[in-house]
Image (cartoon, rainbow, N blue to C red):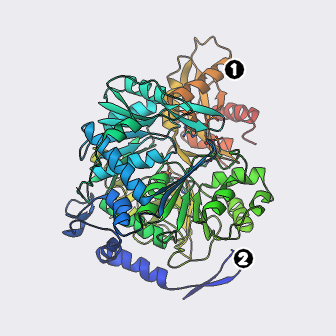
Amino acid sequence: MLVIVNNYMCEKIIVSETYQDLYSQSINQPEQFWADAAQAISWSKPWDKVLDDSNIPYYRWFKGAKLNTCYNAVDRHVEDGIGDQTAIIYDSPVTDTKQKISFSELQQQVAKMAGAMANCGVVKGDRVVIYMPMIPQTLVGMLACARLGAIHSVVFGGFAANELATRIDDAKPKVVLSASCGIEPNRIVAYKPLLDDAIDIATHKPDHTIICQRPQLIADMTAGRDLDWQQASDAAQPHPCVEVEATDPLYILYTSGTTGQPKGVVRDNGGHAVALAWSMKHIYNVKPGEVFWAASDVGWVVGHSFICYGPLINGSTTVLFEGKPIGTPDAGTFWRVIEEYQVKSFFTAPTAFRAIKGIDPDGDFIKKYDLSCLSALYLAGERCDPATLTWAQDKLQVPVIDHWWQTETGWPVAANLLGSCPAPVKAGSPSRPVPGYEVEVVDPSGEKVATGESGMIVIKLPLPPGTLPTLWQNDQRYFDAYLSQIDGYYLTGDAGYIDEDNYLWIMNRIDDVINVAGHRLSTGRLEEALSNHPSVAEAAVIGVKDDLKGELPLGLVVLSSDCTLDHREVQKQLIKQVRDEVGPVAAFKLIAVVDKLPKTRSGKILRATMKNIANGDEYGIPATIEDASVLDSIESALHDMGYAQ
Ligand code: COA
Ligand code: AMP
């Protein structure tokens, strides 16, 4: 039995052996472990095989089983007699709206919306792109796709038309669901013109769009193609749940890779439902009937798993919050929601807490509310700095659980299992591997490194249920990006180490992906947007440290010899260019105009070296550098911007 001093409230906690038992069983008898977990799900046909390993390295879970994810998230709860229980609480300080939707009401709305899409010709296996704000209709749209066996692909509202077009061309949707607008604290975002532009840019043209008209802004409609959400839904017959294979895709979610072309992460139906039901109980410690709140956005994986599917499959109530941690109207908005709806477990990104702490360092807003209902706070999306974690613990007086996962995995890889075997918190670590994930740290040759030594974090195959089986219609890219580097392992793209208590420490990415306010961005995509400007000869984007957002993108550009524009004008145009091409979510505002970029003799830009310089970290001059003096001019340019201190 292991005894560790808990740094939370300085108590001695005895770690039970349950974690070891649970974890060992998941690794040594995975089929038994996941077959047991699968009892939480209603299947219309049982599986022939729990784990299909007939096509290594492409594994499939619950082969031969049939189910419907929407049935599991909605209909079965109505059949079980909890139809009157609240399924969704919609709280929107930006529109001054509060609404509760019961499971029975949700079932009616989803069935009608599924009928409306069926009237547009959507059938099992068709794709539907969803480009919508944080309103209940977005969840209705996702569940309606699941009901039909159609595959949804939600695109975050902060992306620009070009990014939406790229996703439309890859997913080739029959229908796009959208809304007239989204509401940001400082402006109304007209979604429909962005969607129209995206459809113009894309090669693939959807047959129809179904638009939810919000009273804040009424969108212009294209006759014949665009349908009104309410009218289409009113006119439709309720559609029943369509049985699908456990291995059929439920959704595609695009995420940033190292290139400008996003990766279409595929999620299956069966493994996903099992993994989320397991997580709600063992990680988030939430029972049916209790209230769970993930303050994220449905455009991200957190929103898919823990605003929409996880809580609903579990028969819990989910909170859909359309607002920000600060400014809507103040830094007490999170605490108001927790008290008002008796939230038991709350999940958000560390950046949200840094924003609150910046405005309310003494936690005065927290003191105004009775938060006795809250049992734990979960943080993910980026590394949680110990100062933020400690502040949250002190002010909220509940365990603060940093947990680590990715769009690809769909649910946590490392977490403190508060629901079954809580462990001491170590600030800065997302705790130990979750059952099902055999996490190792290796060197570039694939050799396991010693305890406490840093390296690439990999996960032994097969990955557990709920994780990506492949990339959309691209097994080869899935293999090349994740499986080809270390035989028999999935490459997470993160680096870090495992300590003597088996706790993981996630330190940085090994690729050109940066994390801005918990949002994952490809520096390659930002460089592409900069290079599209006629005045730019060459561009490199690096992530620089930021107290609020964790990281911010900073562009270093070399101007073309015929550029006659003043530097300030170029910078203004480039900021606009990235915002128009990639979207406001990139938060791209920092540009240094330089004479030359540092490169190796073979022409590779030394981004990591520039990042270290910018962040004031130690750096060595690579032996392969073409001209070391370039680093001095980069340092001086970054210094002038307040970096490289
Ligand atoms: N539709 C359109 N635009 C959007 C958008 C959406 N759904 N979401 C964000 N944007 C815009 C914002 O309006 C902002 O635009 P601006 O440059 O005109 O101000 C820009 O994208 C950047 O947004 P954001 O990252 O939200 O920054 P912010 O400065 O507005 O707010 C925080 C800062 C910390 C409050 C905010 O980042 C936050 O709440 N973070 C939590 C992150 C989170 O939940 N991550 C999910 C992973 S779990
Ligand atoms: P996304 O796919 O957008 O969810 O981003 C996943 C990436 O965010 C991971 O690969 C990590 O780099 C980072 N990340 C997420 N959660 C954590 C965490 N708890 N600690 C450190 N990094 C995290």
Residue 342, above or below 167: below
**Residue 579: % across, % down:** 56, 29
Q: Evaluate if marks 1 and 2 touch, with contact meaning CB atoms under 8 Å apart.
A: no
Residue 431 versus residue 291: which sits nearer the camera?
291
The residue at the point 36 percent across, 41 percent down is 233
The residue at the point 37 percent across, 52 percent down is 108
Badge 2 marks a residue whose secondary structure is loop
In the rendered image, the residue lying farthest to the bottom is 1
CA separation, marks 1 and 2?
Answer: 51 Å
The residue at the point 72 percent across, 79 percent down is 10
Residue 211 versus residue 107: which sits nearer the camera?
107
Ligand 1 position by quadrant = top right
* Mark 1 / mark 2, whichever is N-terminal: 2
Badge 1 marks a residue whose secondary structure is helix
Can you tell which quarter of the image residue 350 is in?
Answer: bottom right
Give the residue type that dot 1 points to.
Arg
**Residue 415: % across, % down:** 52, 68
Residue 70, above or below 49: above
Give the residue type that dot 2 points to.
Met
**Residue 303: % across, % down:** 49, 52
Badge count: 2
Q: Is residue 136 visible?
A: yes
Q: Which residue was labeled with disc 2?
A: 9
**Residue 641: % across, % down:** 73, 33
Residue 323, above or below 274: above
Quadrant holding the C terminus: top right
Disc on res. 568: 1
